[in-house]
């Protein structure tokens, strides 16, 4: 287990870092699990657990009671199986079959989520079928992405398959005014009648809060485990899991009329004090947070004081205006990128994107520190 350290100590010489509260993660999982009971609560931890490190996230969720996990593909599945060695933990590969990898599905006990007739035919001819490796069936009920067309899935319902799970995915579960989720759920339940006795799942993080009818046998929360993207619901009070900080490299006085940053897109209209932060788009900070004289960008926080970005976000550096900062600020101090003062959803909204993208964009050079219970 990684030891905690005083991450704000300048002697640690850290660059940008994220703090991941595993206790909050555990509490969020337990809250969801209790809310959807008696349905089973699985966990979607694809894309390296949304950028937060699949090993530590999975271990924490196991301790919290999770026994079923969804990852992107066989490669993530193998990595997760090496962490969760026991086969009592079920791992589903969402992106279907990787052809020629059938022996790995059986070897590591990874359940492929079949989403087309071609995948189904390949499965039947492979060693997976001979070894009776179970599968999940993904049905496209209105997303037009992965999944069997309705006519195709009905054609295989009489096949001799070991189907572990039937699933579908909602296109806009977060839109409380949309009727599409209800239509998708209705289609899914009608098709499921052809697979008697097979467990059903359609709910992601947002769908969990559309009502108990969406919970079915199993729910698959992802982003909500980390306390993100929950503005449209109040039934569960999620805890914030992730905070991000970056150090100040330099503080300088800029005279009125001086340009700041690439493209000279921002020109100081008065004498300004700026702080240069060691963070940039190589660390996952979107350039859309940049500020020009015509466009106000995003803000970060120093000791609870908002400090606006000025100029363009560059690869490694960002400038912020600390002229009005009502606190003593020094080189080596850490600036909150997101955390207590603005959560990642707020920063994402200011960047015209979503928290999913910000989390998964966190570069490998952004150090991760896990806060244990």
Image (cartoon, rainbow, N blue to C red):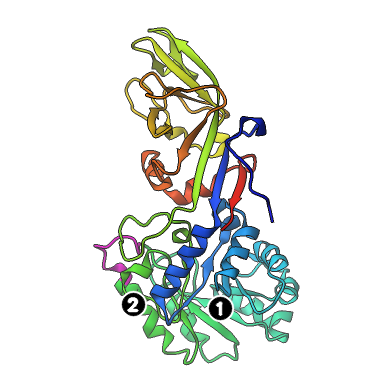
| Residue 298 visible in rendering | no
Residue hosting label 2: 212
* Segment tinted magenta in the rendering: 172-181
* Quarter residue 364 falls in: top right
In the image, residue 229 sits, relative to residue 103, either above or below, namely: above
Q: Residue 39 placed where, x, y %?
A: 44, 80
Q: Is residue 54 left or right of residue 215?
A: right
Residue at image point 47% right, 64% down: 27
In the image, residue 144 sits, relative to residue 246, either above or below, namely: below
| Residue 3 visible in rendering | yes
Q: How many marks?
A: 2
Q: Are marks 2 and 1 in contact (CB under 8 Å)?
A: no
Q: Residue 310 placed where, x, y %?
A: 41, 23
Which disc number belongs to residue 136? 1
Q: Tag 2's secondary structure?
A: helix
Please name whichever residue, 182 or 43, is drawn nearer the observer in this view of the structure. 43
Q: Residue 225 placed where, x, y %?
A: 47, 61
Please name whichever residue, 35 or 347, is drawn nearer the observer in this view of the structure. 35
Check residue 179 for magenta coloring: yes
Residue at image point 45% right, 43% down: 339
Q: Tag 1's secondary structure?
A: strand
Neighbour tally class for label 1: few under 14, some 14-19, many 20 plus, Cα within 10 Å = many
């Amino acid at each position: 287990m990684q030891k905690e350290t005083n991450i704000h100590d300048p002697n640690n010489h850290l660059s940008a870092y994220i703090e991941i509260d595993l206790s909050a993660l555990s509490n969020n999982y337990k809250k969801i699990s209790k809310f959807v009971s008696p349905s089973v609560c699985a966990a979607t931890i694809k894309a390296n657990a949304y950028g937060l490190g699949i090993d530590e996230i999975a271990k924490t969720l196991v301790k919290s009671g999770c026994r079923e996990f969804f990852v992107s593909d066989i490669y993530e599945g193998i990595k997760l199986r090496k962490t969760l060695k026991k086969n009592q933990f079920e791992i589903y590969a969402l992106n279907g079959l990787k052809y020629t990898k059938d022996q790995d599905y059986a070897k590591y006990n990874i359940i492929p989520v079949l989403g087309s007739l071609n995948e189904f035919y390949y499965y039947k001819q492979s060693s997976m079928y001979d070894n009776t490796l179970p599968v999940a069936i993904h049905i496209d009920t209105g997303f037009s992405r992965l999944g069997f067309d309705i006519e195709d899935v009905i054609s295989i319902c009489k096949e001799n398959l070991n189907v572990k799970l039937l699933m579908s995915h909602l296109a806009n579960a977060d839109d409380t005014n949309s009727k599409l989720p209800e239509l998708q759920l209705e289609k899914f339940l009608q098709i499921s009648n052809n697979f008697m006795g097979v467990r059903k799942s359609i709910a992601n993080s947002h769908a969990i809060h559309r009502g108990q009818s969406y919970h079915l046998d199993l729910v698959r929360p992802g982003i909500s485990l980390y306390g993100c993207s929950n503005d449209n619901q109040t039934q569960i009070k999620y805890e914030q899991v992730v905070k991000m900080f970056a150090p100040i490299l330099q503080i300088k006085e800029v005279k009125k009329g001086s340009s700041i940053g690439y493209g000279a897109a921002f020109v100081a209209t008065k004498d300004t004090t700026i702080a240069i932060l060691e963070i940039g788009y190589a660390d996952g900070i979107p350039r859309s947070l940049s500020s020009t004289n015509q466009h106000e960008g995003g803000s970060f926080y120093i000791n609870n004081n908002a400090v606006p970005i000025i100029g363009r976000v560059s690869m490694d550096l960002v400038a912020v205006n600390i002229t009005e900062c009502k606190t003593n600020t020094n080189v080596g101090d850490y600036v909150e990128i997101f955390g207590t003062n603005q959560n990642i959803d707020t920063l994402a909204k200011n960047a015209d994107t979503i928290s999913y993208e910000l989390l998964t964009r966190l570069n490998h050079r952004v150090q991760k520190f896990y806060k244990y219970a």
